[in-house]
Image: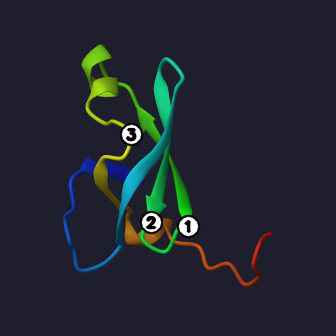
Protein backbone atom coordinates (compact mmCIF):
# COMPACT_ATOMS: atom_id res chain seq x y z
CA UNK A 1 0.00 0.00 0.00
CA UNK A 2 1.31 3.45 -0.92
CA UNK A 3 0.59 6.52 1.20
CA UNK A 4 0.33 10.06 -0.24
CA UNK A 5 -0.39 13.33 1.54
CA UNK A 6 -3.69 15.00 0.66
CA UNK A 7 -6.92 13.77 -0.85
CA UNK A 8 -6.58 12.44 -4.40
CA UNK A 9 -9.70 10.84 -5.84
CA UNK A 10 -8.64 8.07 -8.19
CA UNK A 11 -10.84 5.74 -10.22
CA UNK A 12 -10.01 2.53 -8.36
CA UNK A 13 -7.80 0.92 -5.74
CA UNK A 14 -7.69 3.89 -3.39
CA UNK A 15 -9.15 5.15 -0.14
CA UNK A 16 -9.10 8.53 1.55
CA UNK A 17 -8.57 9.03 5.26
CA UNK A 18 -6.61 10.75 8.00
CA UNK A 19 -3.52 9.70 9.96
CA UNK A 20 -4.73 8.26 13.27
CA UNK A 21 -1.45 6.94 14.66
CA UNK A 22 2.21 6.63 13.64
CA UNK A 23 4.86 4.27 15.03
CA UNK A 24 8.41 5.22 14.01
CA UNK A 25 10.48 2.04 13.81
CA UNK A 26 13.78 3.26 12.38
CA UNK A 27 13.82 1.85 8.85
CA UNK A 28 10.03 2.12 8.47
CA UNK A 29 6.87 3.54 9.98
CA UNK A 30 3.63 1.79 10.78
CA UNK A 31 0.83 4.24 10.02
CA UNK A 32 -2.82 3.79 10.98
CA UNK A 33 -5.13 5.53 8.53
CA UNK A 34 -8.73 6.09 9.67
CA UNK A 35 -11.16 5.94 6.75
CA UNK A 36 -14.44 7.90 6.53
CA UNK A 37 -16.41 4.86 7.77
CA UNK A 38 -14.20 4.64 10.88
CA UNK A 39 -12.26 1.56 9.79
CA UNK A 40 -8.48 1.55 10.29
CA UNK A 41 -6.01 0.54 7.57
CA UNK A 42 -2.46 -0.23 8.70
CA UNK A 43 0.26 0.88 6.27
CA UNK A 44 3.97 0.00 6.51
CA UNK A 45 5.98 2.83 4.94
CA UNK A 46 9.74 2.67 4.35
CA UNK A 47 11.93 5.53 5.55
CA UNK A 48 14.23 6.22 2.65
CA UNK A 49 15.84 9.16 4.48
CA UNK A 50 15.54 10.99 7.80
CA UNK A 51 13.30 13.58 6.18
CA UNK A 52 10.85 10.98 4.83
CA UNK A 53 9.51 10.27 8.35
CA UNK A 54 8.59 13.94 8.70
CA UNK A 55 6.40 14.16 5.61
CA UNK A 56 3.31 12.82 7.41
CA UNK A 57 1.76 13.90 10.69
CA UNK A 58 -1.19 13.11 12.95
CA UNK A 59 -4.65 14.02 11.60
CA UNK A 60 -3.17 14.76 8.16
CA UNK A 61 -5.40 13.99 5.18
CA UNK A 62 -3.96 11.14 3.10
CA UNK A 63 -4.80 8.88 0.18
CA UNK A 64 -3.80 5.21 0.20
CA UNK A 65 -3.46 3.29 -3.05
CA UNK A 66 -2.63 -0.29 -4.00
CA UNK A 67 -2.01 -2.41 -7.09
CA UNK A 68 -4.88 -4.44 -8.56
CA UNK A 69 -2.79 -7.58 -8.11
CA UNK A 70 -2.52 -6.94 -4.34
CA UNK A 71 -6.20 -7.56 -3.64
CA UNK A 72 -7.35 -10.66 -1.74
CA UNK A 73 -11.03 -11.45 -1.19
CA UNK A 74 -11.86 -12.33 2.40
CA UNK A 75 -14.90 -14.57 2.67
CA UNK A 76 -15.34 -14.29 6.45
CA UNK A 77 -15.33 -11.27 8.74
CA UNK A 78 -12.43 -11.30 11.18
CA UNK A 79 -13.31 -10.10 14.68
Does 51 sit above or below residue 46?
above
Residue that numbered label 2 is attached to:
35
First in sequence, mark 1 or 3: give its number: 1
The circle drawn on residue 11 is: none
Q: Are marks 2 and 1 in contact (CB under 8 Å)?
A: yes
Distance Cα–Cα, label 3 vs label 2: 14 Å
Element type where label 3 sits in the image: loop
Residue that numbered label 3 is attached to:
58
Distance Cα–Cα, label 2 vs label 1: 5 Å
Could you tell whether 42 is left or right of 49 in the image?
Answer: right
Q: Are marks 3 and 2 in contact (CB under 8 Å)?
A: no
Residue that numbered label 1 is attached to:
39
Question: Residue shown at 30%/78% (left/top)?
Answer: 12
Which quarter of the figure is the C terminus placed in? bottom right
Q: Residues within 10 Å of mark 2 (few under 14, many from 20)?
A: some
Whole-percent x and y of residue 53?
34, 25
Quadrant in which residue 48 is drawn: top left
Question: Residue shown at 21%/73% (left/top)?
Answer: 10
Whole-percent x and y of residue 71?
51, 71
Does 63 sit above or below residue 19?
below
Whole-percent x and y of residue 4?
26, 49
Amino acid sequence: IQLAAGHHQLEANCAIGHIDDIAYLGSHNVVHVRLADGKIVQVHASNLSRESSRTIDFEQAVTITWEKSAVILLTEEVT
